[in-house]
Image (spheres, coloured by chain):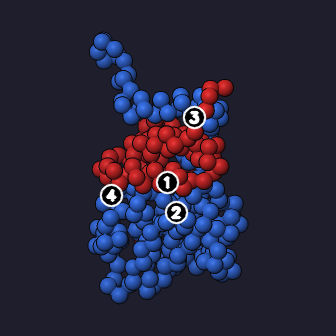
Amino acid sequence: MSEKGHHPAPPSPVEQRVAALEALLTERGLVPEGFIEEITRQYESEIGPLNGAKVVARAWVDPGYKERLLADGTAAIAELGFGGAEGDHMVVVENTPAVHNVIVCTLCSCYPWPVLGLPPSWYKDPPYRARMVREPRALLAEMGCPLPGDVEIRVWDSSAEVRYLVLPQRPPGTGEMTEADLAGLVTRDSMIGVARL
Amino acid sequence: MTAPLSLSDLDLPRRNGELVFDAPWQSTVFGLAAAVVDNAFGGDREPFRQQLIKAIAAEPARPYWESWTAALEALVETLPEQPAP
């Protein structure tokens, strides 16, 4: 690698560590052929916030579904075909005019993968993890989600067992929209609770 | 209120301007952890989660996927030694 300009950079220390892990785990037979490519493909193209948006839209148009969703999130989400890693104990928390919910993981990065995919980088960073518990109203305002003083904020810290999903309020003036069009209104951030629709 | 998005915009987790992984080694180490959880811990994510909590607490400012890597290294240390097949 003495020539300049035409060679890729040598692997960084962390890249070398990951390559060593891959070699070791493959040698031990723990990494089936194609496993990493397949799981990467799933989280890059299949498992993402669209799943959660479909859940929210169904709850907006089907009161019976909403009731089941709030009573047993895991089962109701499975009705739409979503489940798997990090989705075994789903609890859905409903926003109302008086209550705004927001999710965080204070210790690491727990997040409802089957309905939101993998978390955004800010969700995993120390400022969000610390401040959402200490001063949620100020942080939400900084993130573009100011809330009236009379709206109660409930912060849900994901634990080892439970993963939370926020059910946003249905926007006014959407009474004529189809379920599919409603799903198009639902953003990832609204289901984390750092945005309102 | 956010501008309406079409369903096709929502298909990829990279919407909201963010890719799921920034570099190939990140998706590799994500997949390796998933493989270890599935194939060495019977799908139980908790042992890895405990290592991730420790790794993040040890160096809170370290980039996330580097803490993830450190957590997986520590978890692999706990696996029983196996003779090569």
Pointer 2: residues within 10 angstroms few (<14), some, or many (20+)?
some
First in sequence: mark 4 or mark 2? 4
Query: Mark 1 near mark 2, Cβ–Cβ under 8 Å?
Result: yes
Q: Which residue was labeled with disc 3? A: B81
Q: Which residue was labeled with disc 1? A: B49
Q: Is residue B25 visible?
A: yes
Q: Nearer the viewer, mark 4 or mark 3?
A: 3
Check the picture and name the quadrant holding the N terminus of chain A. top left
The amino acid on which the numbered mark 4 sits, given as a three-letter code, is Pro
The amino acid on which the numbered mark 3 sits, given as a three-letter code, is Glu
Q: Which residue was labeled with disc 4? A: A126
Secondary element type, mark 1: helix
Q: Position of residue B70 (x, y in %)?
A: 41, 42
Query: Mark 4 near mark 2, Cβ–Cβ under 8 Å?
Result: no
* Residue A45 against residue A35 in the figure, above or below: below
Q: Which residue was labeled with disc 2? A: A160
Label 4 marks a residue whose chain is A
The residue closer to the viewer here, A166 or B7, is A166
Which chain is red in the picture?
B
* Residue A78 against residue B65 in the figure, above or below: below
Q: Quadrant of residue A144?
A: bottom left
Q: Position of residue A36 (x, y in %)?
A: 58, 38
> Do discs 1 and 2 belong to a common subunit?
no
Q: Position of residue B19 (x, y in %)?
A: 45, 46
Pointer 4: residues within 10 angstroms few (<14), some, or many (20+)?
some
